[in-house]
Amino acid sequence: MLEKFLLDATYDNEIVAFLNKISKSNYSVLGYHYPNYRKMLEKIDIGKPLYLGLRDNKENIVAILPGFIKTQKEGSVYSSLPFFGPNAGILFDKNNINQEQAHLYLLQFLFHELKNYDMVSASLYSNFYDNSDFPLLQKFIPDSITLDKFTSYISLYDFKLSSSLEYDIRKATRSGVKIREVRTMQDVEDIYNIYKQNCIDYGILLKPKECLKSLVEQSKSTNTVKTYIAECSGRVIGALVMIYSPSIASYYLPCSIHEYRSYQPMTFLINHAIQESIRMGIYYWNWESSPSKESGVYRFKKKWGSMDKVYKIFIKPFKDIHFFKKLGRLGIGELYPHYFVYPFSEI
């Protein structure tokens, strides 16, 4: 007998134990699934957590669906998960429940809970690693719009640096670049100022400072976040925030000062984080998605031997197309920042 229940903060220790248990055989468990990431999203007021669980007759968690919901007078939107679109979706313990059963129960539970809101749309991202959830999400999210996306990753089992990357790393060393972990709030200010300028220079949507502050605080006390700094002559010239699960290292927030790019601080930081990940027993490096396969970001990832993987976003609209056209792209972005509400290409 399986029981559906809402996962609030009182279950955090059980969630961590569940994720740690399944992570060595389920490579879709990301650092984003852990309670610390949820706490960061709550701090930046991304919305209200709506985390769903299934437990067996011994009260052990056997499946979870993390998500957030945001409500405005125009209606509510749900996403698993919002905020720069990390893969989330349903995670389950294959030794205690089968995949189809986990998807059926949790998606039924989700749409039952959403009846309590005046819904605009709901979006779910497929898992990071396992594409076998595609047909189940399609089956149990009726009348959904499906978008194909891609992400890049590295297998760390047999990772080897190319000669060009080895050259760049030697150049960073010769230039006097050193790496350390974050220590003070001044480090946070320095990192955020560099990151903010990078976003301005490249037209990238800026994460709020409270996001960085929260993650840096976690990096001091947990093993799910690490913040690395590149210094030269005592000046912070770059940084990299990584988010970890026991099996996956996720490349989350990179930044560097433009004038120091020739010193190769990002290559130096990434290689340091990769070597640390290998020492930690991490299996895969998750680059996250890129703007396109023609972008410089994508080409940079390819230099590291990256492979591509398809993932999908399933969007369930609860309003007709005229509602979304009336709101428009600008209105949707202002009302529901960081949520995938509706494909802009359709409006």
Image (spheres, grey):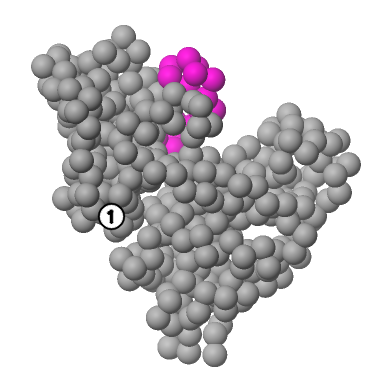
**Displayed quadrant of residue 189:** top left
Q: In the rendered view, would you say 198 is above or below 12? A: above
Q: Main secondary structure of the magenta part?
A: helix
Secondary element at tag 1? loop
Q: Position of residue 68 (x, y in %)?
A: 59, 54
Q: Position of residue 220 (x, y in %)?
A: 25, 44
User: Where is the N terminus found, in terms of image quarters?
Assistant: bottom right
**Displayed quadrant of residue 104:** bottom right
Residue beneath label 1, please? 283
Q: Disc 1 marks which amino acid?
A: Tyr
Highlighted magenta segment, given as a residue range = 197-215
Q: In the rendered view, would you say 57 is above or below 302? A: below
Q: Is residue 335 left or right of residue 19?
A: right
Which residue is more in the foreground, 272 or 205? 272
Is residue 204 among the parts visible in the rendering? yes
Decide whether residue 210 is among the magenta residues. Answer: yes
Decide whether residue 135 is among the magenta residues. Answer: no
